[in-house]
Amino acid sequence: MSDRIKKAGRHVSQNEGLIFEQSALGKRGIEFPPLDVPAVDARAALGAAYAREGIERFPEVSEIEVIRHFTRLSTWNHAIDLGMYPLGSCTMKYNPRVNEFVSRLDGIATEHPYQPQELSQGCLKILKMLLDCLVEITGMDAGTLEPAAGAQGELTGLLLIRAYLEDTQGQPRKKVLIPDSAHGTNPASAVIAGYEVENVPSDERGQIDIASLKKIVNGNVAAMMVTNPSTLGVFEQNIATAAELLHAHGALLYMDGANMNALAGVARPGDFGVDVMHLNLHKTFSTPHGGGGPGAGPVMVKKILQPYLPIPVLTEKSGRLALENHRLKSIGRVRAFGGNFGVLVRALAYVLAYGPGIRQATEDAVLNANYIRNNLEDVYDLPYKSPSMHEVVFSDARQKKNGVNTTDIAKRLIDYGFHPYTTSFPLIVPGALMIEPTESESKQECDLFVGAMRAIAEEAATNPELVKTAPHSTRVSRLDEVSAARKPILRWRPCPSGPCLR
Amino acid sequence: MRYLPKSPAERQEMLVAIGARSIDDLFASIPAEFRLKAPLNLPGPMSEHEIIEYFRARAAENSCGYTSFLGAGVYNHLRSVVTDSLIQRGEFLTSYTPYQAEISQGTLQAIFEFQTLMCQLTGMEVANASMWDGSTANTEAVLMAERLTGRRRVVVARSLHPEYRQVLDTYTRNLGLRIQEVGFTPSGQIDAARLETAIDNETAAVIVQSPNFFGVLEQVPHLGELAHAKGALLVTAITEGVSLGAVRPPAGADIVAMEAQSFGLPPSYGGPYAGVIATRDKFVRQMPGRLAGETVDTAGRRGYVLTLATREQHIRREKATSNICTNQALCALAVAIHLCLLGKEGLKELAEQNLAKARFALQELEKIPGVRRAFSGPFFNEFVVELPRSVKMVNAALLREKIIGPLPLGSFYADLTKRALFCVTETTPRAEIERMAAALRQILSKPV
């Protein structure tokens, strides 16, 4: 291993097959208290037509084998707890452990969504306090904590717009405008909300192009969805003008709050014309990504949209909190049982830890991104020069000349002990390197990252093959994604003749 | 602030390095009128200790010390400390969606195992990496059936969870899908005769739940035949996964939409849980959500990747099969770990304990004058009882005995007042069942 790889070293990585391959008849990893009522035979209780025999090839393993199996698997992952995870637009910040602890308390984790509300005041107070905090942070008027993730927040927000337009203008209109730099969930959500999508090109600075917006805004447009800061990590200078323009035509402004980590405590979407927005609690508010979820996607709205919020709605009467299910104008329910409560608990714990000091987190996140930009812009191409906020987007234009692309650089970064940045997004930057360090990185970690990125730039020039075949230090090398998609193997199946050793 | 790893001197050093006079320089791109002049009005800052105290105080305002007979889509089951300690390993907890396969093999292999376990449980051929919950999985299954058939009508059992039906309604209202509901017979099962007439050549899917909202098992194979006879698909929702340890998987279903909360996930006042979509191989390209697949690396070693991504929003944008991005990966991992701990024998024993407890509870209740089971169909661990009084009044009296009573069905079905949905699992001790029955007898013996 090259001596300039400072952060990572090799160590033994345990081999581990699939859990099904370790199974042997009669083992188990959990035992129950003995049954204290008369036993029942499933066949007798349900009848032969309904009763099931044992499940063929269901795993049979002991407790220690389960512990070893999943512990070994875990060591094959990179994680925030191991080091910088600079995925742009994902906000991979520290996930405080106290958040995990409080979400598991008896009286929190144990509560049933249908238990009487007089026995749920603690849960409801948590919801109320979080909602109040999010109102203050975003500058909006009200909100719902129900959506399960950002994409469901988007859908909810668009359904609110739809309901508002139908109610006040008699029809929901036809189109939603979405910039070409947007996340893929934006157009996908718009379609489920029953809208056509019109893509809006960005201007030469990667910003909303007011001149072209003027040409396309008309009575058919229900809303525009804007990510601010944009996916280039740049504040939308024209956001308030865009809002005025939309409002003048009776349309609304939706803000994708995926990048709220650049704004918390510094500026509020409610102040610059946003009518409705979602937050990703698993980004800005530190709830763990967990390998792809769970998240939560609260939606915050201005007063005009409040009557349409999904049920249940949190209300307060003489000091008692309640969830109300009867709202004449509500868009209905978007998820059963009110939402990912356990995630909301973690997010509140995060806000309470900072209080008004949340601004410091935002400042540090922006400082880190600018520090990295400053230290890399002489070796990587920076297609948009606008000031960066919480993330910076380079392109692989210089390295391409030696046949090295953004994916190669990303894979080589693994050898240096870092998780790759986001590759190939936003789509308006060909060969994008989208880097978001978050506030959770020390100067030392940022310096190591800068050192690694500079070393790779040099390798790309002097030894491109080394970069193109990276990573060289992982359990597996680059995987064959083409054959995985051509002949999908999506589940384990037993080999026909006994145990299968591979 | 303890989460922030920079000293004041280091911040200054970094500002100098980038040529900024102060941190405010870095926010100059925000128009001045939108920059906050005063700190936000937020509670805190709090130390770790204070945070714990705050949440302990809230927990104390909830239902600790009560025995509950609630189910209705969210179930109390025993969980092992093993599951929770494993999912709190930082490598699982603090990693992202496994797009970079070489350093995400742990998550990817675990998803592959989860997919396999879901196939084994449901009897289906392929399952995805998880959906947000059972209600959204059910809705996505309906949208999937619409894409597969190109038809615009959906027939839904009234015995499908009422909140699942509400979510389906919210999603489909603007998409031009027409929904028709079909009621139930005295057995508690869907009215098959009415169902047969409701299905026509425009029907994309029939949606039933089994065990259904009343705890009653549906005759799924027969319902599949009715749907297939008109070219419609059968979607089967399952809210109580533990039933699959004793009950035949839904043969005849084309898509299974399951809530996997019962396997190692706490009720947590509504979430996070783990939804599942499982289906037949031939439908996989219309499936929503992520999928992990097996492949090999450049040296021929077995490994796993996210695959068939051309269905998904980050590639297909407005033409994607769904808008889902973040799913419930860590919850799915907990489910997989819990199922591995259970194993074949544990799952069977667990299911049979539920069967036994629920039957014991029903027998105890039926000894009370005026109390009888409302439906006659086979049930797993939930059953509906008809009471001689308002369920809400009875529940108010039970609360005084520190018992959270059954779900009043009248709040969801205007025609089912005085009907109460009881859930009894392996977590309810016999003594508590007997105490509840005695309390109910006492309550009903008093004049109104």
Image (cartoon, coloured by chain):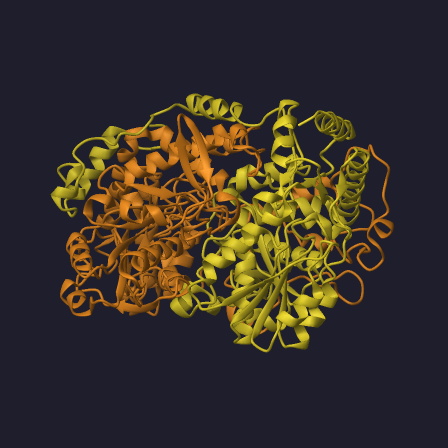
Chain colours: A orange, B yellow
Where residue B383 appears, as percent x and y from the top left, is: 72, 44
- On the picture, is B204 further left or further right than A49? left
Q: Is residue B419 left or right of residue A176?
A: right
Quarter-of-image position of residue B68: top right
Residue B311 at least partly seen: yes
Q: Is residue B414 above or below residue A342?
A: below
Q: Is B22 on the left-hand or right-hand side of A323?
A: left
Q: Nearer the viewer, residue A458 or A185?
A: A185
User: Image point 37% across, 55% down: which residue?
Assistant: A154
Depicted A428 relative to depicted A93: above or below: below
**In which quadrant will I find the C terminus of chain B?**
top right
Where residue A280 appears, x then y in whole percent? 38, 47
Vertical order, B304 against B384 (above or below): below
Residue A243 located left or right of residue A199: left
Q: How many marks?
A: 0
Q: Nearer the viewer, residue A365 or A190?
A: A190
Toward the viewer: A66 or B354? B354
The foreground one among A113 and A116 is: A116
In the rendering, at what x and y percent does residue A362 appear? 28, 39
The location of residue A79, given as percent across then percent down, is 47, 45
